[in-house]
Image (cartoon, coloured by chain):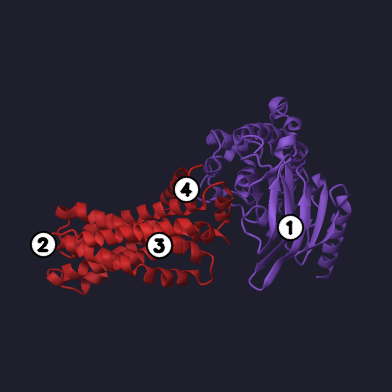
Chain colours: A red, B purple
Amino acid sequence: MTLARAAGVILAKELRTEFRSRELLGTTAVFVLIVIVLFSFTFNPTSSESRRFGPGLLWLAFLFAGSLMLQSSFLREQTNDTLAALRLAPIDPFSILAGKMAANFLFLLLVEVILLPVFAVLYNVAILPVLGPLLLVLSLGTIGLAATGTVFSAVAAQARLRELLLPLLLLPVLAPVLIASTEATIGVLRDPSELSPVWLVFLACFDVVFLTASWMVGEYLLEE
Amino acid sequence: MPWSADARSNCCAIWSRAELSRVSTPLASSPNGGAGDGPGNPSAANSKIGLGIQFSEVEKRYGMRLALRGVSLSIAAGECVALVGHNGSGKTTLLKIAAQLTHPSRGKISFHDRESPISLEDVKSRVGMVGHHTLLYEELTADENLIFFAKLFGLENPAERAREALQPVGLAGRASDLVRTFSRGMRQRLSIARALLASPGLLLLDEAGTGLDPEGQHWLGAAIQRLRESGCTILMSTHGRNETQGAVTRAIRLEGGKITHDSGAGGDPNEVLVMAAVRDSGEGEER
């Protein structure tokens, strides 16, 4: 079975289980909403500062949400040791990671897209005219977040103090994604809007490097 | 490989469906009488289905603890081997190494069928395992679980294979129910169906009878007997004597990660099994 097909089968399973239980999407969306609302209380929504700081706060909220959501990505495979069942299958071990990365990317992107209008209202930002470039930045940043988070979720799931370990591992590694995504988002929301190719290339490079690295070490990450 | 994966898959699939259905027990909701004749006849598949396995000086270390201490063991294709021993004696570790779920810290493992060695990559599609855990997704139905694993194993007509696999384990009527609504015994039966889905040449059972009622134990014992007769290699860990041991052709006792007793390929396994049962019951009484 090809890597893409196996990853697709695992992605379909992830979507089916999540949309059936709705455990992650609901809690993560509410968490991000609370963070965005609480942050908005600390600023005057009409000020230019709020628009300058808004993207940073938004990405910080996405980062925290990611560490919360991605925690369970491999933890729930431990309930009945289903990770062993996946590893018993004659598939490329990276396809397990790839399927989960794709699922986490979609979940995170969905939460982000749902909460974008709330952010626009609270921070007095017009997002409709720049929706295309904004979605591009969101996608590239979220790929990095999902890929890194999925890999570290696999590592942390096998450790003691796993709930604490994932944010400790994840947040420092994601600092470049946070900086690049924030800078790119600030540029997009600026008047006049400007999509910085430097930050986009930086995000794309981070995604490619991290995906390649996880493809190379995927087998070892999943081993007991 | 001496024969193609497709040919093996077709042959074993027909065999497996037919054989499991032939295990006549109340669990089988609609036994498929006479299905064992024709191309699925075990005697026809016998020379091709089993996988042999060789452990050479295998050592496994978890941190400071040695779970296996230089285990050397050769299991021929078609043998049905029972691993006995106390908790922590290394049975599960040996099975996990055979399933390639974990690698030995030292030593090596190799596989062969009756004709030639097989690469570790090719072996994966020919190994089935029932573990301590059910290896099933609770948020999926019985049907969805089996279809998912059938797809991962690259089987043709996954839905049909899943439906057929549920029949002999008596869960056809619960195919659309979520696994989390199942009892322990039902989960275990579904877990066995999952392990047999791809018609394995090597079946690894880690206390597979756990959670099964006497009826289920009887069914499992009969299923193992049928699989053994067809040439499938079976390596199972077990505690004490139970229904599954009727099919055993060889018994090995592990203690502290070492083989202390081995009835051998042509020997009488009962001696080791009885000894294990006596020791276990003796220790039970002491406790």
Give the mark, 4 or 2, whose residue is nearer the N terminus.
Answer: 4
Q: CA distance from mark 1 to mark 2?
A: 70 Å
The mark closer to the camera, 1 or 4, is: 1
Q: Which residue is mark 2?
A: A191
x then y, percent, for residue A54: 21, 67
Q: CA distance from mark 1 to mark 3?
A: 38 Å
Q: Mark 4 vs mark 3: same chain?
A: yes
Residue lying furthest left in this view? A192
Disc 1 element:
strand
x then y, percent, for residue B144: 52, 42
Q: How many marks?
A: 4
In the image, what residue type sits under mark 2? Answer: Asp
Q: Mark 1 vs mark 3: same chain?
A: no
Callout 2: 10 Å neighbours few (<14), some, many (20+)?
few
Residue A10's label in the rendered image is 4
Callout 1: 10 Å neighbours few (<14), some, many (20+)?
some
Q: In this rendering, is residue B120 above or below B48?
A: below
Q: Is residue A176 left or right of B123 when viewed as pictured?
A: left
Q: Which residue is mark 1?
A: B56
Does the residue at mark 1 contact the one at mark 4 (Cβ under 8 Å)?
no
Disc 3 element:
helix
x then y, percent, for residue B113: 71, 42
In front of the other: B56 or B285: B56
Q: Which residue is mark 3?
A: A148
